[in-house]
Image (cartoon, rainbow, N blue to C red):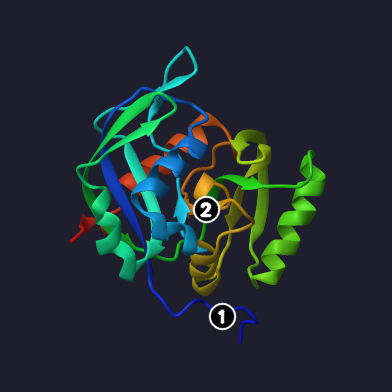
Amino acid sequence: MSRFALPGAEFVDLAFSLAGGPLPRDHSLGLWHAIARELPWLEREDLAAIFPVRASALSDGVLAVGRHSRLMLRLPAERVRDALALCGTALAIDGARLAIGRALTRPLIAHGTLYAQRVASAADDEAAFEQEAAAGLAALAVGGELVCGRRTAAAGPGGTLVGFSLMLAGLAPAESLRLLVAGLGPHRKLGFGAFLPHRSTAAVGSDRAAGEQRASADSDSHWMAAT
């Protein structure tokens, strides 16, 4: 039996349609502050995660919010109704305004390969990060093949946060679900340590890998209207 027990609550993904923008590429801190103003209870949900907004990058370093752009949260299923308070609101994020539309939800489903766009690290080099990640995964009783990607940096409440993209392959179903719920490392509400299903052999951390991860998530047939 695993040494790590999943929380009793069922977790789901909740995705909102968006309009507005454009957004700065590094928008996660502003996004979290804007959401927290609308959903103050979210700060108390330790395992909740906010994914960076899915949007197309423009040449001037900003993101164009289009009809396929989504704001995605991962949270306990019992909180879905509370989170739907975001529908119809407008979030002010670093000078941009995002109109929040309808929401879809899906259960967390085990996949053999998971990918995180960034996992926070106290180290500044890949080798040290691999050791950190391996220790964190061992604490969760998660195995699999670990593949590190490129270094990333994002604004945090106390300064710049460093992280690396990370793929895990060959996961057993129980390990996959455990990692989807628990995540890896701190700063989940700033988009760190939150994993999604992945089906690509593209270089980890590349724009292609991130794009195929988004395509895999968008094509999932388990999405349904949130109520």
* Location of residue 216 in the rendering, given as x and y in whole percent from the top left corner: 38, 46
Give the distance between the C-alpha atoms of the residues marked 1 and 2, in whole angstroms.
Answer: 18 Å
The residue depicted at 28 percent of the width and 61 percent of the height is 82
> Disc 1 marks which amino acid?
Ala
Question: Closer to the camera, 207 or 182?
Answer: 182
* Location of residue 98 in the rendering, given as x and y in whole percent from the top left corner: 30, 32
**Splitting the image into 4 quarters, where does residue 19 fall?**
top left
Question: Closer to the camera, 203 or 211?
Answer: 211
To which residue does mark 2 refer?
194
Residue 109 appears in the rendering: yes
The residue depicted at 68 percent of the width and 45 percent of the height is 148
3 relative to 16, above or below: below
146 relative to 165, above or below: below
Q: Earlier in the sequence, mark 1 or mark 2?
A: 1
To which residue does mark 1 refer?
5
Labelled disc at residue 212: none
* Location of residue 64 in the rendering, given as x and y in whole percent from the top left corner: 36, 23
